[in-house]
């Protein structure tokens, strides 16, 4: 019993508020061993302990469609908005999610500016995006990819490390 209580307390400290509320509403208490079977907790680039990375493919377009990389982290509501804007675009594309807490260099560069978006590896936008701007950029990227030309990097690429040195 002592082990289950200890595991449950640790589980509660690693879960989101939404998960806790849902669990408490149902009257459940899951031991940590249930969650750790998915992935062991580890320290991320941000210095916090966590279980899961949000990195991965959100959805895939055709092989000829451009790849959009969304630099994000767990709990980023602006990132969720950017995902929904991109999902609503008519131009086919692939959306790849990259968790900035998985890599200390990404964390150092983007920690104050997520979401950050790249198209075909080139910086495109940060923070809020509009559907019209996204459609225009995706059409441009599709056209350039068909011509085997790179997507041009936009101005304003964030660099938190450089900003911290200047302040």
Image (cartoon, rainbow, N blue to C red):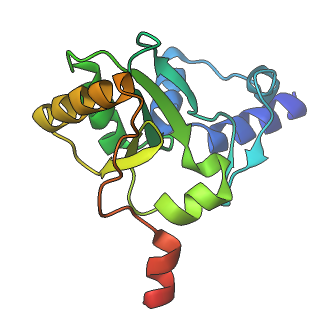
Residue 128: horizontal and vertical position, in percent?
Answer: 23, 47
Q: Does residue 87 sit above or below 135 in this rendering?
A: above
Dividing the picture into quarters, in which one does residue 80 lie? top left
Residue 4: horizontal and vertical position, in percent?
Answer: 82, 28
Q: How many numbered marks appear?
A: 0
Q: Residue at x 43, y 38 (%)?
A: 70
Which image quarter is the C terminus in?
A: bottom left
Residue 65 visible somewhere in the drawing = yes
Q: Residue at x 42, y 25 (%)?
A: 95
Front residue (pair 43, 70): 70
Front residue (pair 121, 82): 121
Residue 110: horizontal and vertical position, in percent?
Answer: 47, 59
Q: Does residue 57 sit above or below 113 in this rendering?
A: above
Residue 46 visible somewhere in the drawing = no
Q: Which residue is drawn at 40% across and 40% down?
A: 150
Residue 43: horizontal and vertical position, in percent?
Answer: 75, 52
Q: Residue at x 35, y 22 (%)?
A: 146
Q: Does residue 41 sit above or below 89 in this rendering?
A: below
Query: Given the current orientation, which residue lies at the most extreme bottom position?
Result: 167
Judged left or right of residue 57, residue 30 is right
Front residue (pair 72, 162): 162
Which image quarter is the N terminus in?
A: top right
Query: Given the current orientation, which residue lies at the most extreme front position?
Result: 147
Judged left or right of residue 30, residue 63 is left
Query: Given the current orientation, which residue lies at the most extreme left position?
Result: 132
Judged left or right of residue 45, residue 153 is left
Judged left or right of residue 136, residue 84 is right
């Amino acid at each position: 019993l002592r082990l289950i209580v200890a595991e449950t307390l640790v589980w509660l400290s690693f879960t989101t508020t939404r998960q806790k509320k849902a669990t408490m509403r149902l009257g459940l208490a899951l031991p940590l061993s249930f969650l750790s079977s998915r992935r062991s907790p580890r320290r991320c680039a941000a210095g916090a302990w966590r279980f899961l990375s949000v990195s991965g493919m959100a959805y895939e377009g055709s092989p000829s469609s451009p790849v959009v990389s969304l630099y994000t982290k767990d709990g980023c509501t602006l990132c969720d908005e950017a995902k929904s804007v991109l999902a609503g675009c008519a131009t086919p594309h692939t959306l790849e999610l990259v968790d900035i807490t998985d890599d200390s260099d990404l964390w150092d560069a983007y920690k104050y500016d997520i979401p950050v978006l790249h198209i075909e590896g080139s910086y495109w936008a940060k923070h809020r995006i509009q559907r019209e701007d996204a459609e225009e950029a995706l059409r441009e990227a599709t056209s350039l990819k068909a011509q085997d030309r790179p997507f041009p990097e936009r101005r304003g690429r964030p660099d938190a490390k450089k900003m911290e040195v200047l302040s």
